[in-house]
Amino acid sequence: MALFRIPGGVASQVRARPSHPGKEKGLQTLIENNLDTLFGVRFVATEFSTGSKHRGRIDTLGLDQDGSPVIIEYKLTSNDNVINQGLFYLDWLMDHRGDFEVKVRSTLGDVPTVWDSPRLILLASSFNRFDQYAVNRIDERIELWTYTLYEDDLLGIELLSSEEVSTSTGNATIKRPTPKAQAPGRPTRSVYEREHHVSKMSGSTEVLFELLRDEIMKLGDDVTERFMNQYIGYRRLKNFCEIVGMKSKLNVFIDGPIANPKGLGDDVSNIGHWGTGQRRIEVADEDDVVAALPLIANAYGLQG
């Protein structure tokens, strides 16, 4: 992605700084100091030890807005096998939930941890097509993010979408394999799909959901959809809205200090609710969909 300054309407390109692998520890510190702004993740630990038996160190541990554990690994050189390393740590984490939760309590206090959908974020200056293809074939929640450090202390980060991965491999569609059976005695990880939520809706609210979802996904190629147990989340860098489906209506929760001149919806920032948004909009007909969309678009735009 090219970046330009436009003082007085005249464009001049901002140059990327040369990459120096030996100095990339500074990038990790920069990311950790700004986890919430960049990824909507609360910092838990850096260089977290997996113990003497496994003899590894997880670069960055965090907890996202949904309460899901987050592992961040940094690819510093082209030879780093960051995908296999990240998967090893994700597997270790699922088998050592107690260690993670103890660390969360010591860092963040008594906050809940949700094990439905742990995230693995892999951050590199670039990924090759083999990296992208491998990730698209693996049935885990893996995100490939690229970063660019520019002159004048500018940082650019970008999520590689599934469409980009498919295009880079030359395939229109790549099907993920069927998840493997859980090993006996191993903690399970629930995987929720669209049907889990649609089953809670009536036919009329499902139609409203599809209308609303289509418009949300049109906001940009960087919108990602995440199926949690109680809600469906939509994020850019972090959550900007969530949908809870019911028989009679949809509850839409919108994140951030949105512009809301008509005062639509209810402030639920101090009320327990599913989702991470602070404003609840009830959607019971197509007019409600039309009314909610500008607020959702505003929340999306705040992350741009």
Image (cartoon, rainbow, N blue to C red):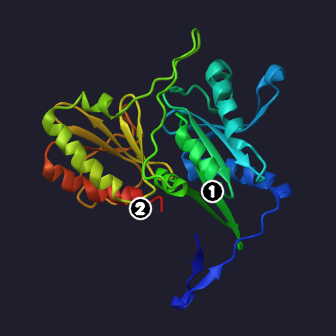
- Indicate whether 257 appears above or below 15: above
The answer to whether residue 258 is visible is no
The answer to which quarter of the image holds residue 191 is top left
Name the residue: 56% across, 49% down.
39
Q: Residues within 10 Å of mark 1 (few under 14, many from 20)?
A: some
Q: Position of residue 255 (x, y in %)?
A: 40, 48
Quadrant position of the N terminus in the picture: bottom right
Q: Which residue is mark 1?
A: 146
Name the residue: 65% across, 54% down.
127
The answer to whether residue 25 is visible is yes
Q: Is residue 51 left or right of residue 2?
A: right
- Along the line of sight, which residue is nearer the eye, 23 or 288? 23
Between the residue at mark 1 and the residue at mark 2, the CA separation in whole angstroms equals 21 Å
CB atoms of marks 1 and 2 within 8 Å: no
Counting residues from the start of the chain, the first of labels 1 and 2 encountered is: 1
Name the residue: 28% across, 52% down.
214
Secondary structure beneath dot 1 equals strand
Report the amino acid beneath label 1: Thr
Which dot marks residue 301? 2
